[in-house]
Image (cartoon, helix red, strand yellow):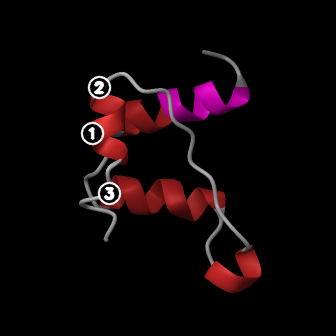
Amino acid sequence: MDYKTHPIRTLVENGVRVTINTDDLLIFDSSIENEYLKLYKAGTLSAEQLNEIRQTGLGIL
C-alpha cells in the first residue's frame, strides 16, 4: 500500500478521529513530520485535514 491509497482518507472522510504516528525511527527511517508530509504530497489529505488530525492528537479538538 502506498500513501496515495492509504485508507486514512476514507476514515477521515467518514468522520473517524485518527492520529498519525510513526513506529521505530531507526527501523523505518521516518519522523512524524515526514509522515504528515508524505500524506500531503501524495494528495491523500489536505493541509486542513492534516491540521485537524494534528489538533486531535494534541487534544485540542
Q: Is residue 48 left or right of residue 10?
A: right
Residue occupying the point 65% across, 66% down: 31
The residue that mark 2 highlights is 14
Element marked by disc 2: loop
Q: In which quarter of the image is residue 13?
A: top left
Name, please, the residue furthest toward the bottom: 27
> What's under tag 3, amino acid-wise?
His
Q: Is residue 18 above or below residue 28?
A: above
Label disc, if present, on residue 18 of the rendered structure: none
Residue occupying the point 69% across, 84% down: 27
The residue that mark 3 highlights is 6
Q: In this view, does 60 lie above or below 23?
A: above
Q: Does the residue at mark 2 contact the one at mark 1 (Cβ under 8 Å)?
A: yes
Q: Residues within 10 Å of mark 2 (few under 14, many from 20)?
A: few
Element marked by disc 3: loop
> What's under tag 1, amino acid-wise?
Thr
Using the numbered discs, state the Cα–Cα distance from disc 1 to disc 3 in whole angstroms: 8 Å
Q: Is residue 9 above or below residue 59?
A: below
Residue occupying the point 62% across, 53% down: 21
Whether the magenta-drawn stretch holds residue 47 is answered as no
Q: Does the residue at mark 2 contact the one at mark 3 (Cβ under 8 Å)?
A: no
**Start and end of the magenta stretch?**
52-58
> What's under tag 2, amino acid-wise?
Asn
Using the numbered discs, state the Cα–Cα distance from disc 2 to disc 1 in whole angstroms: 6 Å
* Quarter occupied by the N terminus: bottom left
Q: In which quarter of the image is residue 2?
A: bottom left
Q: In which quarter of the image is residue 19?
A: top right
The residue that mark 1 highlights is 10
Residue 24: x %, y % from top left: 73, 73
* Quarter occupied by the C terminus: top right
Q: In this view, does 4 lie to the left or right of 47?
A: left
Element marked by disc 1: helix
